[in-house]
Image (cartoon, rainbow, N blue to C red):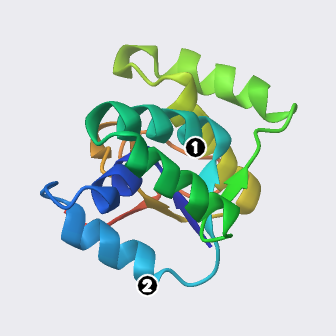
Amino acid sequence: MLIVDSGPLVAAASTRDVHHPACAALLRSAAGPIVVPELVVVEVAYILASRLGSYAEVAFARAIANGELEVAAVGDAEWGRIAELVERYEDLGLGITDASVIALTERFGASELATLDHRHFSVVEPRHVRRLTLLPGQ
């Protein structure tokens, strides 16, 4: 299982993105399901539509519909953890979407996270591991 933040999904969709080769390769080689938190879906859809156009947004929706990406809903119990993380990392500017990513890594016991956001995710301490392994590496 690989939990994915918005950055790698956007970079994989954009051949002009400097991170495209690494992110596309990471997503192609992922063992097990590629899990996208539901709040990340909204973020990615907005970014794809605004930067690349509706064709990219449609391709993203089709990847979900075809089972290439698995959407994980935020459970009722996780909203408290999300609020706790946003409050704890207020100075960092950790928002609800990024906090939901952390909450889902905790739920699934995932130690790896696909993200380009090292600023947030290299600092935040999940409950289940000391630090997440951030992919692709820098």
Residue for point 36% across, 22% down:
92
Residue for point 66% across, 69% down:
66
* Residue 115 visible (yes or no): no
Residue for point 12% across, 57% down:
18
Q: Nearer the viewer, mark 2 or mark 1?
A: 2
* Residue 24 visible (yes or no): yes
- The mark that comes first in sequence, 2 or 1, is 2
**Rendered-image quadrant of the N terminus:** bottom right
List x then y, in percent, for residue 54. 41, 41
The circle drawn on residue 101 is 1
Horizontally, residue 24 falls left or right of residue 128, namely: left
Residue at far front of view: 55
Task: State how far apart marks 2 and 1 are (Cα).
Answer: 21 Å
Q: How many marks?
A: 2
Type of the residue with mark 1: Val
Mark 1 crowd level (few <14, some 14–19, many ≥20, 10 Å Cα): many
The circle drawn on residue 61 is none
Check contact, mark 2 vs mark 1: CB within 8 A.
Answer: no
Q: Is residue 105 above or below residue 48?
A: below
Horizontally, residue 73 falls left or right of residue 126, namely: right
Q: Is residue 50 above or below residue 87?
A: below
The residue pinned by badge 2 equals: 29
Residue for point 45% across, 15% down:
90
List x then y, in percent, for residue 40. 54, 40
Q: Secondary structure at mark 2?
A: helix
- For this rendering, which residue is in front, 100 or 128? 100
List x then y, in percent, for residue 137. 26, 67
List x then y, in percent, for residue 136. 30, 67
**Rendered-image quadrant of the C terminus:** bottom left
- For this rendering, which residue is in front, 6 or 106? 6
Type of the residue with mark 2: Ser
